[in-house]
């Protein structure tokens, strides 16, 4: 019975939602990279200015993530689609350890599936941009890219925490992330490629395969998210709490997160407390 309870503690529907959401985000976002910057780009003759194409790419890439957040998939899992975001919520005390493992595993698998599909669909065009790999810009060192990734991930996670800790702002979190990440891609990608996400960088490196400077993207975003948690705890007003573990909180969807303060009609935590109580365990 105890083995069943441990297996039951995993939330497979949420992990599947994270997997599919991450795969969708990477396939759509990197397809925009392929079309805007790959060989024989159909967009380049229409928009010769590289900066404008970067902005367009950012709007599509970030927009696909925001669409996941407001979709049924995102309303269920919370649409982290990024191990750095999941890590931040866990450190803040909003996730159980098994869900941390489940979410991050699903995000990496989803990223690999999304990039594999990209390589199959776009073939030579995708290969011409190394399947969307993130690499330091030619004018920047790997340590400069590292610092940039720490900084932009810090800013993104801190803004997410600010929004999901406010009853007035929390519903606008997907819109905020769309705008902020699009601007980051536009302005910062010449430095580091604007990863923000270890799974987003790992998958193209695996599929290509090429591992040059990939330590930057496996270490810097999680570090930036941890610094954002520390900053939020230090700077937020007394009594202000993270209200939800989701980027778009829908009250009629179940929540597997801990200490949810946002209005919700049903929480999976209640059922788990009942199932784990001594009176419900078999002798």
Image (cartoon, rainbow, N blue to C red):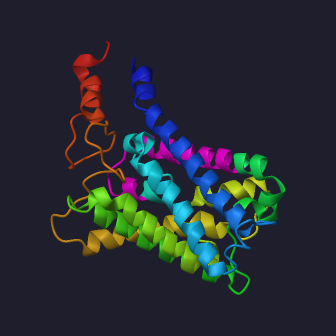
Quarter placement of the N terminus: top left
Where on the picture, by quarter, is residue 277? top left
In the foreground, 87 or 39: 39
Q: Is residue 197 left or right of residue 261?
A: right
- Residue 3 seen by the camera: yes
Magenta span contains residue 93 = yes
Residue placed at 42% from the left, 50% from the top?
Answer: 69
- Based on the picture, tell me whether residue 255 belongs to the magenta stretch: no
Q: Main secondary structure of the magenta part?
A: helix
- Region rendered in magenta: 88-115
> Outermost residue toward the bottom?
139
Q: Residue at x 80, y 59 (%)?
A: 125
Residue 88 lies, with reference to residue 120, above or below; the image says below
Q: Where is residue 245 in the image (x, y as percent from the top left)?
A: 34, 51
Rendered position, 24 above or below 212: above
Instruction: Name the side, left or right, on which 209 lies relative to 235.
Output: right
| Residue at left offset 34%, top offset 39% | 256
């Amino acid at each position: 019975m105890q083995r069943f309870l441990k297996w039951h503690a995993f939330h497979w529907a949420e992990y599947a939602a994270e997997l599919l959401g991450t795969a969708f985000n990477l396939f759509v976002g990197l397809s925009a990279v392929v079309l805007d910057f790959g060989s024989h780009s159909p967009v380049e003759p229409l928009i010769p200015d590289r900066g404008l194409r970067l902005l367009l790419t950012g709007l599509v890439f970030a927009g696909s993530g925001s669409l996941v957040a407001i979709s049924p998939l995102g309303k269920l899992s919370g649409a982290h689609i990024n191990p750095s975001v999941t890590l931040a919520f866990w450190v803040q005390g909003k996730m159980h350890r098994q869900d941390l493992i489940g979410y991050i595993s699903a995000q990496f698998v989803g990223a690999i599936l999304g990039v594999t599909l990209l390589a199959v669909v776009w073939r030579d065009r995708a290969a011409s941009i190394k399947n969307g790999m993130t690499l330091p810009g030619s004018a920047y060192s790997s340590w400069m890219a590292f610092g940039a990734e720490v900084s932009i991930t810090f800013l993104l996670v801190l803004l997410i925490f600010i929004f999901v800790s406010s009853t007035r702002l929390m519903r606008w979190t997907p819109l905020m992330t769309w705008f902020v990440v699009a601007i980051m891609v536009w302005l910062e990608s010449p430095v580091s490629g604007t990863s923000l996400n270890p799974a987003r960088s790992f998958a193209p490196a695996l599929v290509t395969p090429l591992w040059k400077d990939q330590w930057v993207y496996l270490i810097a975003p999680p570090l930036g998210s941890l610094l954002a948690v520390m900053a939020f705890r230090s700077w937020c007003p007394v009594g202000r709490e993270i209200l939800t573990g989701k980027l778009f909180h829908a009250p009629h969807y179940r929540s597997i997160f801990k200490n949810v303060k946002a209005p919700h009609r049903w929480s999976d935590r209640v059922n788990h407390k009942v199932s784990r109580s001594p009176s419900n365990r078999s002798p």
